[in-house]
Image (cartoon, helix red, strand yellow):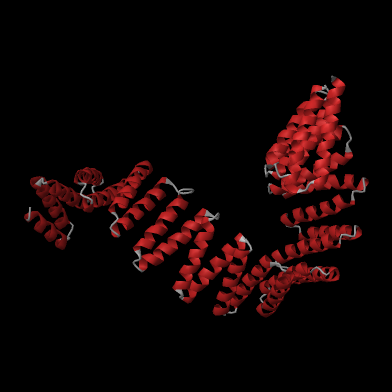
Amino acid sequence: MSQELVDQAMDAHRLAHVIMEGKFGPAMAEAIPHLRASADCWGRALRSKQKGDVVVELGQLHEKLGQTQDAITAYEEAIVVYRETNDRGAIARAGASAGRALQAANQHELALGWLDRSLAVLRELSDMPHEATTLAAIAASHLALGRPADALARYREALPLLTRMSKRVEIAQSYEAMAICSTRLGDHAGAAQLYDQAFVAKQALGDMKGAARTLARSADAERHRGAHATAMQLYERCLQIHQLRGDQALIAQTIGNMGSVHALAGDQGKALESYERCRDLSEAAGERVAVAQAWYNIGCVRVEKNELDAAAEAFDRAATIAEASEGRSLTERALAAAAELHRRRGDHERWAGILGRQAALLEAGGDAAILVQVLDELAEHHRGRQEWDTVAELQRRALVACAKLGSAAELARRRAALGGTDARIGDHAAAVENFLQAVTLWDVAGDTVELARTLRHLGASELQLGASADALSHYLRALSLNESLSDKAGIALALIGVGNAHAQLGNKSEAKAALDRAAVLKEELGDHRGTETIRKASAML
């Protein structure tokens, strides 16, 4: 029976590898059930090491497929299996794999727990290759967590091990990672030296594309710290490599970066020339997102040169191309820039049109806070034009977005505002629904002043619908709240509502009493016109 299980395990394992070698991308998932079958057969045959090895392979396949949580689960299972054999090295290696899978899931603190434990064992066992890779993984998590000093220390530990093993690719990668750490620590001279070492190491490997990328990262670091001349020299070296390789897309990108250096240095003419070259080369290379970025940069330069019409056209083109190319972040930035420019130019129609596009894009999956801001601006624009139906629609959309991030008070304010707009356009049924929800939210928020105000608005809409008893109840509650606040103006308004509700119900004496009290308060407040209006209404009862 045991040999039969071994044969089944080996057959399933071979089949899994045939699939993995013959398939690409998501299709490789077809191997998962066969690896699982192989592992199960090894387990039933009491071959724990073989089972653990296959489960590790299963974890690696899940990682390739981007199934991070499944990968972590597989590695944890492998660790449990290896413990049956007391294979500390295998346990440590599986733990390191689990740590790297957690890194891919951006769970770096958890990853460090696995990696640190694995490192301790690997050092005890003098497993130099895995010790070096684990040190590099630990460094990467520290860097991701914003701890560049800790990351740099770990890379420095890994580098001698990698050197002893002649791991030239990993050495080059470590130099570059150390340069990033040094930059974040403010050691720009040290970073420049490390970038240069990484460049030389990649050159020695014959990886000229990688070497150029290292130069570009070094140039970016110099640009960000304001060392424009040094940055330009590094970009020029990049450009020479890309030209030798004939890589048109990277030639365009580098020229665009050189344009950014010119812009930061204040030479807008050279910046514009570089951006236009970048645009044309990117267009020829079919790099549509790069074309959109170039148009965006051109727009920024045109703004600096006070060429606002040309800037508006550039931003519009950037947004249109980026949107068609599914470059969401760039589309949002271009639309925001275009909107601000049209606002500055006083072109409110185009400004509103751009904001509408921006809102639609954000609703499809953008920043909810920015979406609310955009919708509020649009609502204010249409409010100024007294386009109340449009205002109500925009308020409803903002309310949906705000529900993801707003407090009870903010949601109450927006519900009440929407109710007010509904009332203004005569949709009192919708107004009542929104006011009722606002009342509930104001209760939660504990804002008595706004609660009383909303109750009065609610009562007014209920009167319009003929729901006199409901209106009276809400006006009386508002009256009680206003009295507790000693708010004379609020008391007067609530009394007017109470009087109107009683009048609708046919309670003339109660209506008259409420209106007379309101008139006295209005007079005390110096509102003589209001006093006269109320007394006339009272006299007609």
Number of residue marks: 0
How far across and down, in percent of the image, does residue 233 sit? Answer: 79, 71
Seen in the picture, residue 397 relative to 232 is either above or below; the reply is above
Seen in the picture, residue 114 relative to 204 is either above or below; the reply is above
Is residue 257 visible to the viewer in this orientation of the structure?
yes
Residue 164 horizontal side relative to residue 180, left or right? right
Residue 89 horizontal side relative to residue 426, left or right? right
For residue 476, which quarter of the picture?
top left
Nearest the camera: 311 or 73? 73
Residue furthest to the top in view is 1
How far across and down, in percent of the image, does residue 62 sit? Answer: 74, 40
Residue at the (11%, 51%) spot, across then down: 516
Residue at the (82%, 57%) spot, across then down: 194
Q: Quadrant of the N terminus?
A: top right
How far across and down, in percent of the image, does residue 302 sit? Answer: 60, 77
Residue 12 horizontal side relative to residue 446, left or right? right
Seen in the picture, residue 226 relative to 450 is either above or below; the reply is below
Nearest the camera: 106 or 267? 106
Nearest the camera: 40 or 440? 40
Is residue 115 visible to the viewer in this orientation of the structure?
no
How far across and down, in percent of the image, does residue 188 sit? Answer: 76, 60
Nearest the camera: 261 or 319? 319
